[in-house]
Image (cartoon, rainbow, N blue to C red):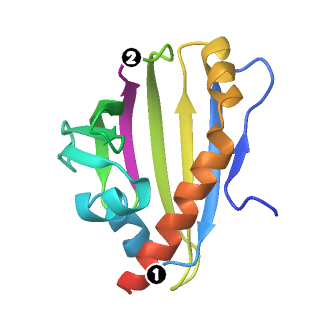
Amino acid sequence: MELKTKIKAEEGKQDLVITREFDLPLELLFKAFTEPEIIEQWMGTKVLKLESKKHGSWQFETSDAKGNVVFKANGTIHEFIPNQKITRTFEMENAPFGVQLELHEFEKLTDDTSKLTIHSIYESGMLRDQMLKLPFTRGINMAHNRLQDIATKLR
């Protein structure tokens, strides 16, 4: 099965570019990245904090069935342009990847379709390559598939 979310990682670089076209209007795709209730559904994580504005911050946390925290991430939103762009930092707690810079760009293709481009920049190429050794590609595809399904029901 072909993965709909594409990841481009050039050899010797410290960034990657993630692209995905959605069968969703631009406004609904953007909403899926800025409304905690929707994020929690497609990401399968708890939104502890989300200030969708310039200089805002965010914090997500995922727990296992026993209540143990298995994932915690946070960051600062540096740029917030509704239906166009979110620039933020992304830091996983208790992980060796350091802080990433993420640029999320949202593009209208038609009235019913849109495109997401995420440019992630890591501290080093080595850290980026470590991330890519995880089931990252499969995981982001699964999350984006859930986003498509959940947001479609919100139409």
Residue name at image x 46 percent, y 81 percent = 152
Q: Which of the labelled discs sits on residue 152, or is there none?
A: 1
Residue at the disc numbered 2: 94
In the rendered view, does 92 fall on the left or right side of 112? left
Residue 112 is situated, as x and y percent measured from the top left of the image, at 53, 85
- Which residue occupies the foreground of this view, 78 or 139? 139
- Circle 2: is it few (<14), some (14-19), or many (20+) Cα within 10 Å? few
Residue 10 against residue 38 in the figure, above or below: above
Residue 27 is situated, as x and y percent measured from the top left of the image, at 37, 73
Q: What's the amino acid at mark 2?
A: Asn
Tell which circle, 2 or 1, labels the residue nearer the N-terminal end.
Answer: 2
Residue 45 against residue 100 in the figure, above or below: below
Q: Is residue 58 visible?
A: yes
Overall secondary structure of the magenta section: strand
Q: Secondary structure at mark 2?
A: loop
Quadrant in the picture for the C terminus: bottom left
Residue 132 is situated, as x and y percent measured from the top left of the image, at 68, 30
> Which residues make up the magenta segment?
85-94
Quadrant in the picture for the N terminus: bottom right
